[in-house]
Amino acid sequence: MREAFHGGGKVKKRTATTITHLPTHAIAAVRHAPKQGPGAGTLTANGFKSARTLPHSHVAAVSGSLRKLGFDTLIHSCRSRRHDLVVAMIVTRILDPRSRLAKARSLDAATATDSLGDIDEDELYDVMDWLLDHRTTIEAKLARKHLEDGALVLWDIISVRMEDTRCPLSNFGLLCNRDGWPVAVEAFAGNTADPATVASRCPNSATASN
């Protein structure tokens, strides 16, 4: 088996390995693989064909970091299908931020772009409803982890313009600790003044910066 490489400004070739020491059926499989063409899969020694492979290393790196930080336990203390779906949504949001529809397609088994894909669209929207119902509990865990009594918190408001006859939710506020770690998020009606949003989300805070 030969491989090409660049050296001294030229393309050179070298012997990577030999297969003469392999069993006869393994040599036949190696020789047969290139004849199948692109996308045809790889025929293994036992006759199985790999029809599709999905990237996994970047998924493992991000999901492993989440577990190391203990972030997955903030979602729920016990593992469940919904718990795993939330983690998958967070991982794909970090790796490739996109719209909800595009996210659903990237997590669907038929159109998956990485090893996270085994989630249909209905499950995705169901778990988003579940997250909304458990938001207060999750935010309380984040507050215990990142905030201390009397600590400085950062609160910022952003207004979103929507082309419509009315926009009941057009202001969004994000609460962070002094290091910028997000703790809570809230949506407000467009006519809500900034001071009122601060009072609603952090009434006991010693200092708030907008």
Image: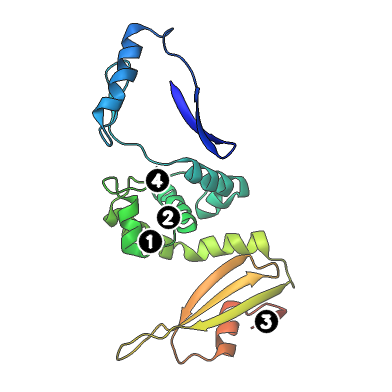
Q: According to the image, label 1 marks what residue?
A: 128
Residue at point 53%, 37% (across, down) = 10
Q: According to the image, label 3 marks what residue?
A: 209
Task: Name which residue type carries label 2.
Answer: Met
Q: According to the image, label 4 marks what residue?
A: 116
Task: Between residue 96 and residue 79, name the one nearer to us.
Answer: 96
Expressed as whole percent of the image width and height from the top left, the position of residue 25 reads: 31, 10
- Tell me which label, 4 or 1, sits earlier in the chain: 4
Q: Is residue 93 above or below residue 152?
A: above
Residue at point 48%, 64% (across, down) = 135
Residue at point 38%, 61% (across, down) = 128
Q: Is residue 185 above or below residue 87?
A: below
Q: Is residue 191 above or below residue 172?
A: below
CB-based contact (under 8 Å), mark 2 and mark 1:
yes
Q: Nearer the viewer, mark 4 or mark 3?
A: 4
**Cα distance in 3D space between marks 2 and 4:** 9 Å
Q: Which structural element holds mark 3?
A: strand
